Amino acid sequence: MQRMALIETKSADAWFTDGCRFEIMNSPDQAREAYGQAVKADPSFLPAHVNLGFMHLRDGDYEASLKCFTRALALQPETPENLNNLGYICERMGRLGNAKRLYGKALVLDPENMEALIGLANVAELEGDYFGAVRQYRKAIEANHEAPAPQYCLAVLYERHDMFDEAALLYEAVLKKDPLYTKAAFNLANLKFQFGEFGQAAMLYQRVLEVEPDNEGAWNGLATACENTGGPRVRRILRRLDYY
């Protein structure tokens, strides 16, 4: 009875704070319960709907995530962030028309919104519209030249279409902006290996491992690259990383 009384009197803000704390502690079940209690205490408490939506998304429960993001958008319909969140879950569920419409609304509110521009590019790619996807990624790049994400996404698109030289140049541009962008470093390492540039590939795999020491793909790539190069410099790298 005492616990029930506590649940009934605790504020939505207090429940939300508990949910955030449980997420940091990597206790997802308790976090979900806390966010759910926050919504019960105050159905208009927007942050709880959003955080709960992302938790369901990580769990792969798209229907539950859709409900949370739909409720968030109903609470604040003129917010690009809420439009993008709902657009993203629609994109993941294959509801591409809805995703395109939501991203488009976000761009009406904020014509240079990076997430919406990339979202439209993703939708175009999923629809098989290669040139449309390239146009959207370039718009995103033009909207913010310092943002590495759209260049990375365009590089991945080029790579999927066997435009390896163009992809490599973009991965290099991403790493100039953000040297710790490990996805770009890993993909560029794979391309360098494919080009036969094993020493550069090894150095890029090393860069990934300095940030992500448990990345198995990078360890395997580094080992294979070193098999093709050898030499004292590479062996020193391997010893420093405790691979051998």
Image: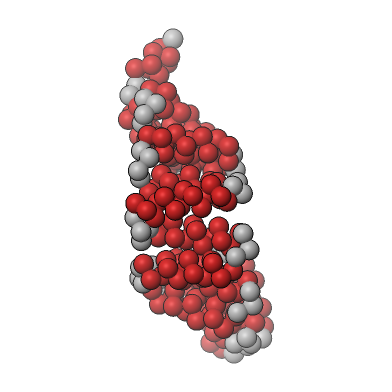
Q: Residue at x 34, y 55 (%)?
A: 110
Query: Camera-side residue: 135 or 14?
Result: 135
Percent x, y for residue 240? 51, 75
Residue, x 51% and y 67% (percent of image)? Answer: 153
Q: Quadrant of the N terminus?
A: top left
For the point 45% across and 71% down, the residue is: 138
Q: How is the image coloured?
A: secondary structure
Q: Position of residue 206 (x, y in %)?
A: 52, 75
Q: Quadrant of the C terminus?
A: bottom right
Is 121 drawn above or below residue 237 in the view shown? above
> Percent x, y for residue 80?
38, 49
**Above or below, 62 relative to 131:** above
Instruction: Please tell me which residue lies in front, 185 or 98.
Output: 98
- Residue 180 versus residue 49 in the image, above or below: below
Observer-nearest residue: 217 or 95?
A: 95
Q: Is residue 181 visible?
A: no
Q: Quadrant of residue 140?
A: bottom left
Residue in view at x 38 percent, y 71 percent = 142
Q: How many numbered callouts?
A: 0
Q: Residue furthest bottom?
A: 231
Q: Is residue 125 visible?
A: yes
Splitting the image into 4 quarters, where does residue 128 fall?
Answer: bottom right
Name the side, left or right, on which 242 lies relative to 113.
Answer: right
Picture layout, residue 195 above or below residue 42: below
